[in-house]
Amino acid sequence: MAHQTAESLNAKQYTEMWTAVDELAEHIRALGDYAPSSYSEMAALSSIVEETGQPDWRLMVTNLAEGQHEAAKSAREVLRVAEDVGDDATADVVAPMITLHEKTA
């Protein structure tokens, strides 16, 4: 039962994150640039260290939560810059992502 619950939760989070990434990519394109499109490009831009090896479930959950906190922190930095320059459209895209990452953590 616990595995099924964890799997369901992971699927829900994956769908929410995928939707957020798609919205962000569309916004980046609307600003006249291209979003990173490969894992290596995304990893180079990420402040989250890639997981290696086979951690036990406790460490995996800890790492996932820490990654969510780090993503929220990065999104807050983007929001601050958007607000500083008066870019309401970017602020509108990023603000819900902060909520999503904080809720998921």
Image (cartoon, rainbow, N blue to C red):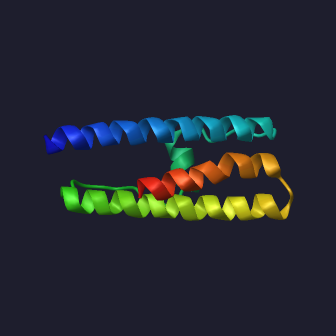
Residue 67 in sight here: yes
Instruction: Specify the quadrant that holds the N terminus.
Output: top left
Q: How many marks?
A: 0
Residue pictured at 23% horizontal, 41% vertical: 5
Q: Residue furthest left?
A: 1
Residue pictured at 72% horizontal, 48% vertical: 92
Instruction: Specify the quadrant that holds the C terminus.
Output: bottom left
Q: Nearer the viewer, residue 94 or 40?
A: 94
Q: Residue furthest right?
A: 86
From this view, report whether residue 99 is shown above or below residue 29: below
| Picture quadrant of residue 23 | top right
Residue 55 in sight here: no
Q: Horizontal placement of 28 versus 104: left or right?
A: right
Q: Nearer the viewer, residue 50 or 98?
A: 98
Residue pictured at 62% horizontal, 58% vertical: 75
> Percent position (x, y) of residue 80?
73, 64
Q: Horizontal placement of 3 versus 75: left or right?
A: left
